[in-house]
Image: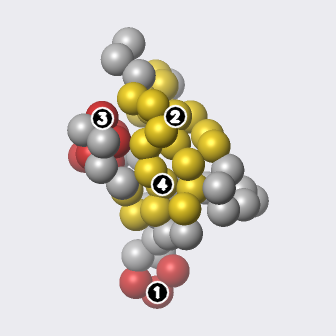
């Protein structure tokens, strides 16, 4: 995850998982749609997110 993607999640915005041609922006392989995960940046948790299609959506932002 990049700093820009983490900032989007911190502000409640979704982040795309894949781009054109299947380029993967965020590592979410082997997870089913609707799965909840913890988004991390540099080893620190940013938000609890849910995989929804080609996006991860923040469920709970962590202000740590």
Whichever of labels 3 and 4 marks the residue nearer the N terminus, that label is 3
Disc 1 target residue: 21
Q: Regarding mark 4 in the picture, which secondary structure is present there?
A: strand
Q: Quadrant of residue 36?
A: top right
Whichever of labels 1 and 2 marks the residue nearer the N terminus, that label is 1
Whichever of labels 3 and 1 marks the residue nearer the N terminus, that label is 3
Residue 35: percent from left, percent from top? 67, 50
Whichever of labels 1 and 4 marks the residue nearer the N terminus, that label is 1
Position of 38 relative to 56 (above/below): above
Disc 2 target residue: 48
Residue 26: percent from left, percent from top? 49, 56
User: 59 left or right of 63?
Assistant: right
- The reply to whether the C-beta atoms of the residues labelled 3 and 2 are less than 8 Å apart is no
Residue name at image x 46 percent, y 62 percent: 55
- The reply to whether the C-beta atoms of the residues labelled 2 and 4 are less than 8 Å apart is no
User: 58 left or right of 50?
Assistant: left
């Amino acid at each position: 995850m990049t700093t820009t993607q983490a900032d989007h999640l911190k502000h409640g915005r979704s982040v795309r998982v894949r781009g054109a041609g299947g380029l993967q922006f965020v590592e979410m392989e082997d997870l089913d749609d609707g799965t909840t995960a913890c988004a991390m940046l540099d080893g620190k948790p940013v938000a609890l997110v849910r995989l929804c299609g080609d996006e991860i959506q923040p469920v709970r932002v962590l202000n740590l």
